[in-house]
Image (cartoon, rainbow, N blue to C red):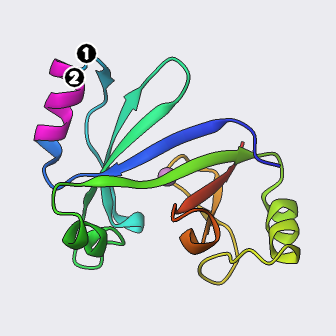
Amino acid sequence: MIDRLNHIAIAVPDLAAACAQYRDVLGASVSEPQNLPDHGVTVVFVELSNTKIELLHPLGDKSPIAGFLERNAIGGIHHVCYEVDDIIAARDDLAAKGARVLGDGEPRIGAHGKPVLFLHPKDFCGTLVELEEA
Ligand code: CO
């Protein structure tokens, strides 16, 4: 079902400092910050040759990553995103296997303009999993 690793998302308390680390210390290609008000985050894309890292910073009062940063003050890996061919088929297959899809179970349009779903971290080794239709 899952195929390529699309991205790893890292929540960061200081976006400028995180960009500087990835650009200046690790020597990566780092995008300009993009505000995604619908998702409650500002995101910076770090382009690697085989995948992406997304640096996430809270945007607005109700950011979905605010609580995570309260528990992880220096930041940390927030989720991993795997690609699937058909997100509805993947959802139905996962539900039949007892995995919990977060929210109302309907795909939303994610940060890349593609349908996404999130799976409960307690079902996947303590890791929040995002599925994105490739
Ligand atoms: Co993501």
The reply, left or right, for residue 86 in relation to residue 56 is right
Q: Vertically, is 91 above or below 26?
A: below
Q: Residue at x 25, y 15 (%)?
A: 27
Whole-percent x and y of residue 76?
30, 53
The reply to whether discs 1 and 2 touch (Cβ–Cβ < 8 Å) is yes
Residue underneath mark 1: 27
Residue underneath mark 2: 23
Q: Vertically, is 61 above or below 125?
A: below
Identify the residue at the far front of this view. 125
As rendered, which of 74 and 92 lies closer to the eye? 74
The reply, left or right, for residue 44 in relation to residue 113 is left
Residue 18's quadrant in the figure?
top left
The magenta stretch spans residue 110: no
Q: Which residues are the magenta region? A: 17-25
Q: Residue at x 81, y 68 (%)?
A: 94
Q: Is mark 1 within 8 Å of ligand 1?
A: no
Whole-percent x and y of residue 5?
61, 38
Whole-percent x and y of residue 92?
86, 71
